[in-house]
Image (cartoon, rainbow, N blue to C red):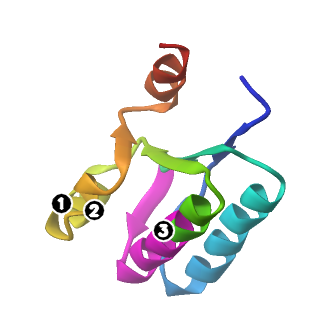
Amino acid sequence: MSSDVKILKPHGILDGTKASPFRQDIAALVEKGAKIILIDFQDVTFMDSSGLGALVLALKTVRAAGSKLFVCSINEQIRILFELTSMDRVFEIFENEDKFLESLKS
């Protein structure tokens, strides 16, 4: 895997208490020169609107730096949240980390 690709794996509940540190983690990856960031939601059990807001703000930060952000391994609750807010049209979502890595090769 390229050093330009960074994978962030939040865990537990992504809500108002974790939103700011989550955004800071992504901003730190951008500052370190990550060109592609994958957020792997495999270990996230629940995300509320605060978590989604943090993800959208992180996307703006990533795009402003000329980098790209992708997500993978979202559970049913997060998928529904994305669909209700039309974020499934904003974020490129992969089934899992392996499918994402395959897409980089092609």
The answer to whether marks 2 and 1 mark residues whose Cβ atoms lie closer than 8 Å is: yes
In the rendered image, the residue lying farthest to the bottom is 16
- Which residue is depicted at the point 48% across and 57% down? 44
Q: Amino acid at mark 1?
A: Glu
Residue 53 lies in the magenta stretch: yes
Residue carrying label 2: 87
Q: CA distance from mark 1 to mark 3?
A: 15 Å
Q: Viewed as shown, does residue 2 lie left or right of 71? A: right
Mark 2 or mark 3: which comes first in sequence? 3
- Which residue is depicted at the point 48% across and 79% down? 15
Say above or below: 28 vs 33: below
Mark 1 or mark 3: which comes first in sequence? 3
State the extent of the magenta-drawn residues as a range. Answer: 43-59
The answer to whether marks 2 and 3 mark residues whose Cβ atoms lie closer than 8 Å is: yes
Q: Amino acid at mark 3?
A: Leu
Residue 83 pos. (x, y %):
18, 60
Residue carrying label 3: 55
Camera-side residue: 64 or 102? 64
